[in-house]
Amino acid sequence: MPAVQETIATVSAIDVDKYKYGFTTEIESERAPKGLDESTVRYISAKKGEPEWLLEWRLDAYRRWLTMTEPTWARVDYPQIDFQDLYYYSAPKKTAGPSSLDEVDPELLATYAKLGIPLREQEILAGVENGQRQVAVDAVFDSVSVVTTFRAELAKHGVIFCSFSEAVREYPELVKQYLGSVVPTSDNFYATLNSAVFSDGSFVYIPKGVRCPMELSTYFRINEKNTGQFERTLIIADEGSYVSYLEGCTAPTRDENQLHAAVVELVALKDAEIKYSTVQNWYPGDKNGKGGIYNFVTKRGDCRGDSAKISWTQVETGSAITWKYPSCILRGDNSVGEFYSIAISNGRQQVDSGTKMIHLGKNTRSRIISKGISAGHSNNTYRGLVSANRKATNARNFTQCDSLLIGENCGAHTVPYIESRNSSAVFEHEATTSKISDDQMFYCTSRGLSEEDAVALIVNGFVKDVLQHLPMEFMVETQKLIGISLEGSVG
Amino acid sequence: MLEIKNLHARIAEDGTEILNGIDLVVKPGEVHAIMGPNGSGKSTLSYVLSGKDDYEVTEGDILFNGESILELGPDERAAAGFFLAFQYPIEIPGVATMTFLKAAINAQRKARGESEITTPDFMRLVKETSAKLNISSDMLKRPLNVGFSGGEKKRNEIMQMALLQPKLCILDETDSGLDIDALKVVSEGVNALRSPDRAFIVITHYQRLLDHIVPDVVHVLSKGRIVKTGGPELALELEKNGYADFVDVAA
Ligand SMILES: Nc1ncnc2c1ncn2[C@@H]1O[C@H](COP(=O)(O)OP(=O)(O)OP(=O)(O)O)[C@@H](O)[C@H]1O
Ligand SMILES: [Mg+2]
């Protein structure tokens, strides 16, 4: 058997037990009754003690959702989702919004410890002394945020970092002003559904001129069976501020598919910069495509002021289906949008991902670097739109889409859309497709590398341009994750 | 050290026989030259020795220090001390030469149960070795073999060999593509590695390489068999008369 064939065989032979995060947590939880109607929306809103306007906002979205149909244009294939067969709210019982870590259920703390997510500030501080950087974490378990660390420290700088539910209570004006201002409730089927039933998520506000003193991160965990996770994240960077934010996700190994339909809204005002990184490692399903997360996510950033900058970096290794297009609206003059993506698919995974760069302002610039790696029987599609409005004089875009195929049974597709209404706009697009050849495998193994190491080395070389955009502390992690995904976690 | 016994090999995909009964014994410290017309199976022999799975051994055996290595994969043979300097080195885009070298050294150390090389040790080693082969630090940062000139690729192969310190070095037409000065530099690199416990199989078409790397034994390969074995003078004879005499013998 030629080397690459063999690697693929090995990869597909290894079952998902390589997925390290597949354990479940036994914890008592409180759920909304199964199914979705107006009473579900009211239940969620009441659970969270929301003001009337937000309930109305949700109900409005719900009614709109009833009139919508699921999008079918993506190159993904899955059985009809029965939206009445899901739970829309699930919260660990004993954790109705803890104010300190001591109140958090030890089961939950143990879960996060097992996932390697630091929640105890003392421990993180000890880490800082050993040269690691500080990271503040918001931990979201099923439908609720269980703890947010480093709030006091952040508050000193005026930075607000808390769960979404809390923001609704504590900072209603900010929430009201910005919620739905980037992704309107009517945006698309999943975003609208999210608007109706969103449970929790993170809220960030960086005041004028403040450079957020530490990395912020949210860690999402789906635990409960048959439960959709609909989180909502809103990040506002006021004028001249800067923040770097990282999102991580895992879920237990389950035979049923689980739905995840999040909405992330970013607002960057004049001269502000938001760097948003995602390492998505949801459970991908087993080698035959059983189970795994359906990840239907709407992420959008609005460069609302001049010279604002938003950059998305994503590493997508998990999920059975990924449907995700983190986008930038380049509204302010001279604003900048970036999208750096690594999407790995293996086994029966289906990825349809990309970005939209909407150039509205003058001299706006965007840059897209997408690296898709397909192995096994997976399908990996880059879908991107770059558009220039009539007023977007001198808009510039550079797009590079590279696909790497491992084996004969996978597919890579590139679907770029370009719409330019301004003759001074310059859009460049480059695309390549390559394969790991048997000769490359033999060359590497003849130097002593194992086949798995050789694949990991070549793939890490392939994605290098994107990796370097991740926050330092996550680079090594991610390199390892890439190795593991191709080893067969996704087999 | 190396004992090849009645080795038959064919292309796995279509069954074409390429090697038709090769016998060869290489002792530690020796340098064997293998010459022969284009398509006679020299590169195939080097691949079969290194474990490339495009080929199937249908008969015979390859013993290394008395043990058959037929069941070992290329990486295991490398860890045991095999090294092949490729006739056509392969490009690995995106992987810096340095990164590759370190990964290879550490993979072999790991296979032998040794600890990883420290970064300062590695840097020092690479700096020394590359300097001897006129390889610039700029080239070390570039992706492995990508855009390297023919001669640069060959020097890079020899650098890898020097870093990995193999026991059995197989050089497949390392001289082709080298300019006169590079030929000297590379030959010196190879000669510096000659030692009583290391052996070489040098595949070449030209005497000029053997002027620098003087072989102990010269073999002529034709149609997948060794048709003539002699001393260094055999190469000179071939240079003068070509293969006509021997190829006929095989036919
Ligand atoms: N993978 C392969 N597929 C098809 N034919 C092959 C393959 N490998 C070797 N051959 C054939 O086997 C024969 C021997 O090839 P090989 O490369 O070993 O010759 P060589 O002696 O190294 O020649 P040269 O001096 O030109 O380098 C040639 O006819 C070649 O075309
Ligand atoms: Mg050859």
Image (cartoon, rainbow, N blue to C red):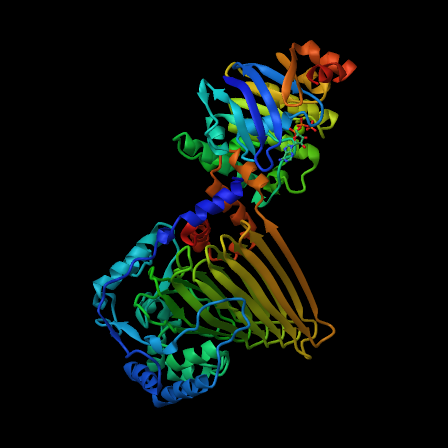
The residue lying toward the viewer, choosing from A214 and A465, is: A465
Q: Where in the image, quadrant-wise, is ligand 1 located?
A: top right
Residue A299 rendering spot, x and y as whole percentages: 49, 71
Residue A247 rendering spot, x and y as whole percentages: 42, 64
Residue B18 rendering spot, x and y as whole percentages: 62, 27
Compared with residue A399, is residue B203 higher up or lower down, i.e. above or below?
above
Compared with residue A74, is residue A187 higher up or lower down, i.e. above or below?
below
Residue A43 rendering spot, x and y as whole percentages: 30, 83
Residue A404 shows up from this direction: yes
Could you tell me which residue is drawn at 21 percent across and 62 percent down? A106
Could you tell me which residue is drawn at 31 percent across and 72 percent down? A144
> Image quadrant of residue B187?
top right
> Does B232 sit left or right of A259 as displayed?
right
Residue A487 shows up from this direction: no
> Does A436 sit left or right of A206 as displayed?
right
> Image quadrant of residue A147?
bottom left
Could you tell me which residue is drawn at 63 percent across and 39 percent down? B145
